[in-house]
Amino acid sequence: MAADSFINWSLLSLSAPGWGGVLLQGFLHSIEIAIGGYALGLVLGVGGAFGKLYGGPILRDLLECYTTIVRAVPELVLILLLYYAGTDLLNQLLGAAGFGPVDISGLMAGIFVIGVVQGAYSTEVLRGAIKAVPAGQIEAARAYGMSPVKVLRRITLPAMLPYAIPGLANLWLIATKDTALLAVVGFSELTLVTRQAAGATKAYFLFFCAAGTLYLALTLVSNVFIGIIERHARRGFAEQR
Amino acid sequence: MTDETTHALAFTPEDLPEKGSFLKPHRIVLMLVFAALVVAVAVFMRWDWLPRYLPRLGSGILVSLAMLFGTAILGFLLAVPLGLAQVTGPWFLKAPARVFCTIIRGTPLLLQLWLLYYGLGSLFPQFPWIRHSFLWPYLREAWPYGVAALTISFAAYEGEVMRGAFAGVPAGELEAARAYGMRRWTMFRRIWLPRAIHRALPTLNGETVLQLKSTPLVATITVVDVYAVISKVRQETYLTYEPLLLLALIYMCLTGILVVAFRYFENRIPTRGA
């Protein structure tokens, strides 16, 4: 077997006979879902962390149940459950409100599913970070007569960021990789598209390695930005050895 | 991955409730509400398929557990040299170990699994000497690829953990060992490795729970673990929620048992100041 038939690079070309364009389209979908899910997760996480730290006993216990379940059940199972339950629930709500059933776009469902999972993770990360803020700083802000929202905006959130950023950075990397799980529910993100391309052309190694390179590139590029953000957030901190 | 992130991703022994402080009035109300919910689920949803599938579910759980413990042990055995190479190895060991960890940690496990199963699996039959080797009956099955992918992934994540743990053992302890005249291997076996494992233990526990959460992926390459059994139930009974709820419950129980066992073992190891 000649070397040029072993690796058929033209399969990766961007235009029609090649699958490169399809792969990049899937990659774009993956990034979209990762960004959307991560953002939704952050919103849920801020709410969850503050609820867990300052909420009433019932709210605290309910949030504890949420984070425990998400951290004890495989993402794959959660994604399936949330995917079916989420779309079903929405359609039933719409049905009850007198609208017909709608076809929920895979993108929205994916963002919702990844966001709920990420929300539990970032709840835990942010809770740890908020607890690391010296209590005296928050007490001082209260003593100045700041309202709780103002304390949050001016003191707690900025002061906890240096503690939260390493964990949140890891969560971003996990979000990008968790999007691959949506392949199981048939959403055409990078991993599923790769499998389809590989199955159609029988060039399994080429396509899976190409997709791996794309994921790895995303991780490495993210790492560069994370390094910059981390240095910026930690300025003024004593250098730890 | 830092210790805190593992904790954020996996249910760990630190999350177990303290004795005594658990039962409070509002908790009893919440538990009653929850019990009512469970009763409603049991009464109003269809569970008549359950007895028929119980034996298969049992064997599925065993396959999942075998996958978990097999890959965790194999992966840890690989992780120790990976971590050690990154801490003290010469450059020609250090660089490949780092590249390996970066690549595996930078790509999704599902992709690695499919690369091994579909990629390698389609490549092997082209070589006659592989088909005639004693390994061929195993290579035709799916589970070796699942074990390989899960082991590699666990090794890469744990290699990073062990790197930090090896580097974190105080230099004075190693110097003391050397001053006693221990040879390098003796020092590694008696001081460095036990201290590193001790330091890494909480993270390793969390990572093992994470590994349990990764095992259902092998169902996508036709290994019949508990997830695959549930998928089969869903296909055959056309039910959506009941099997998935049961599956979530099964995984929660498995995680719970694992975490309780870890706490038991952690408490048996004396730790200064804890």
Image (spheres, coloured by chain):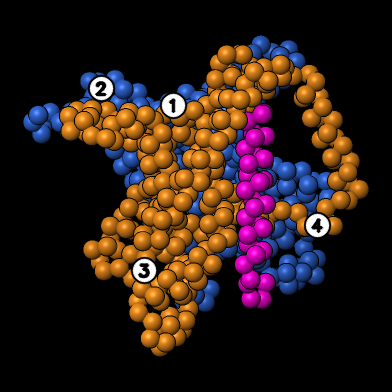
Chain colours: A blue, B orange
Task: Please identify, in this view, whether the residue under mark 3 or under mark 4 is nearer the observer.
Answer: 4
Q: Which residues are magenta?
A: B245-274
Task: Please identify, in this view, whether the residue under mark 1 or under mark 3 is nearer the observer.
Answer: 1
Which residue is pictured at 27% across the width and 28% down the height?
B122
Task: Please identify, in this view, whether the residue under mark 3 or under mark 2 is nearer the observer.
Answer: 3
Marks 3 and 2 on same chain:
no
CA distance separating discs 1 and 2: 21 Å
CA distance separating discs 1 and 3: 39 Å
For disc 1, the marked residue is B222
Q: CB under 8 Å between callouts 1 and 3?
A: no
CA distance separating discs 2 and 4: 59 Å
Closer to us: A48 or B187: B187
What SS does tag 2 mark?
A: helix
Q: Position of residue B253 (x, y in %)?
A: 67, 40
Name the residue type under label 1. Answer: Thr
For disc 3, the marked residue is B87
Q: Chain of mark 4?
A: B
For disc 2, the marked residue is A201
What SS does tag 3 mark?
A: helix
Q: Chain of mark 2?
A: A
| Precedes in sequence: disc 3 or disc 4 | 4
Q: Residues within 10 Å of mark 2 (few under 14, many from 20)?
A: few
Name the residue type under label 3. Answer: Val
